[in-house]
Image (cartoon, helix red, strand yellow):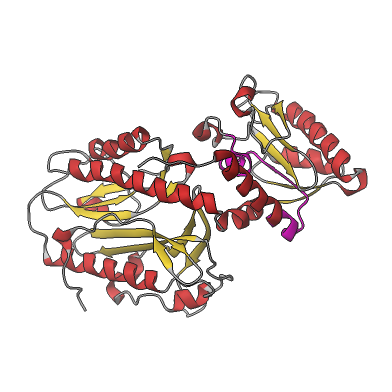
């Protein structure tokens, strides 16, 4: 299966969504160095992972004015012809990573931004939403009369609701990452290290035109409890549980995020392994069944699966989270131990949500991680990840 998509139309759909979101939130201009947000707003991509290490390239998007890309010196040609851009300029380095003169360059870049805002908004009404920059740059903007607000919530609000072509890409990206995951599963065997096996997934992702993997959440045996241990040189043993979370940035920079737990080798699963697997699976399916457009996050949380008491202290930190070009808003928490819940909002049509489940057993130091991603329709829910569950671990949940 090949992906056929009008990329220019995709970029314009996203930018139109961002512009509408800015109008609704009262934001007239927005500036970001975040390479994911630059890509979202314009379709411009250049050394994404490196760009995450500090602000070096920027996009300024004005609701009633230009969209200007400030690009690395000699990288300007990479974004030529994008229909989302009014102009491409050479970026002034404003980080210590870029140049030892970053304080001076902060002043120069502030002057450049102010000249644009004056032309679009007028000198007495300069407003800008900004994120992920050094305080010396924001101080320079304020000293020049710019009223600042934060930009991250604007991007997160915009990215939360997917546009039609985004969904086409996300479906395709999921299919490709699932193929890469099968390469990893086939490589699991006693005597191999976690790193050796995890590398098969990374290889499969890149071979299928994926971008990168944002974590290395792959662990075996006693390293499956507590969770969040990344792959290492630990040698997998027969009978080990093996947890895997894709956390992949796939085709066209769309994330694919599902988790599976496997059994290493031919040794039969223990009763404990089967039981915690079944609890995790029940939690996943129960919570997924409660996804419904228009349902508040609080109602969703209060309807969540009742995890057995002995496992509650080791569960995943959220029930669900958004997904798009990365893990995104919302991050729906569990109800607090005192019964309180403080996370406003509701599930909406064209959100993509990942349902999380982790069940850990402190006595045997084993855990099971499961997760799938779902697209919310007006009156139904579409499962975007369908990678098979582990038949060797299916069992009956302990009471």
Classify residue 388 as left or right of residue 30: left
The residues colored magenta run: 21-44
User: How many numbered marks are there?
Assistant: 0
- Residue 259 in picture, x, y percent from top left: 32, 54
Question: Which quadrant of the figure has residue 94?
Answer: top right
- Residue 35 appears in the figure: no
- Residue 224 in picture, x, y percent from top left: 26, 54
Queried whether the magenta region covers residue 227, the answer comes back as no
Which residue is at a point 64% across and 55% down the rendered structure image? 153
Residue at far left of view: 267
Seen in the picture, residue 225 relative to 334 is either above or below; the reply is above
Classify residue 235 as left or right of residue 35: left
Which residue is at a point 34% across and 73% down the rendered structure image? 286
- Residue 28 appears in the figure: yes
Seen in the picture, residue 339 relative to 351 is either above or below; the reply is below
Queried whether the magenta region covers residue 23, the answer comes back as yes
């Amino acid at each position: 299966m090949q992906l056929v998509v009008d990329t220019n139309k995709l970029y314009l759909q996203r930018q139109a969504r961002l512009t509408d979101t800015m109008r609704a939130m009262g934001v007239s201009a927005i500036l970001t160095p975040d390479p994911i947000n630059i890509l979202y707003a314009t379709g411009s991509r250049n050394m994404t992972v490196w760009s995450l290490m500090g602000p070096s390239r920027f996009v300024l998007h004005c609701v009633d004015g230009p969209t200007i890309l400030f690009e690395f010196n000699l990288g300007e040609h990479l974004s030529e012809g994008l229909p989302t851009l009014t102009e491409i300029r050479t970026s002034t380095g404003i980080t210590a990573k870029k140049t030892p003169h970053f304080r001076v360059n902060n002043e120069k870049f502030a002057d450049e931004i102010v000249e644009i805002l004056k032309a679009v908004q007028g000198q007495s009404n300069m407003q800008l939403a900004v994120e992920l920059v050094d305080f010396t740059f924001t101080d320079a903007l304020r000293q020049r009369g710019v009223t600042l607000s934060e930009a991250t919530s604007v991007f997160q609000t915009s990215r939360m609701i997917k546009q039609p072509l985004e969904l086409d890409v996300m479906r395709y990206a999921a299919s490709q990452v699932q193929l890469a995951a099968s390469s990893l599963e086939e490589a699991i065997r006693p005597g191999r290290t976690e790193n050796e096996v995890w590398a098969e997934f990374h290889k499969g992702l890149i071979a299928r035109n994926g971008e990168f993997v944002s974590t290395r959440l792959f662990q075996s045996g006693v390293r499956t409890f507590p969770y969040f241990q990344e792959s290492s040189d630990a040698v997998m043993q027969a009978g080990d549980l093996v947890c895997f979370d894709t956390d992949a940035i796939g085709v066209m920079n769309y994330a694919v995020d599902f988790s599976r737990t496997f059994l290493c080798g031919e040794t039969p699963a223990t009763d404990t392994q089967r039981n915690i697997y079944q609890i995790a699976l029940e939690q996943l399916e129960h919570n997924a069944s409660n996804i419904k457009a228009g349902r508040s996050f609080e109602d969703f949380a209060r309807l969540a699966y009742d995890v057995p008491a002995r496992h509650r202290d080791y569960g995943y930190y959220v029930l669900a989270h958004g997904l798009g070009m990365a893990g995104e808003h919302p991050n729906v928490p569990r109800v607090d131990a005192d019964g309180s819940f403080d996370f406003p909002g509701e599930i909406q049509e064209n959100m993509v949500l990942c349902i999380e489940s982790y069940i850990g057993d402190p006595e045997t130091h084993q855990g099971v991680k499961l997760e799938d991603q779902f697209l919310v329709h007006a009156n139904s829910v579409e499962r975007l990840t369908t990678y098979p569950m582990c038949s060797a671990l299916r069992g009956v949940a302990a009471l």
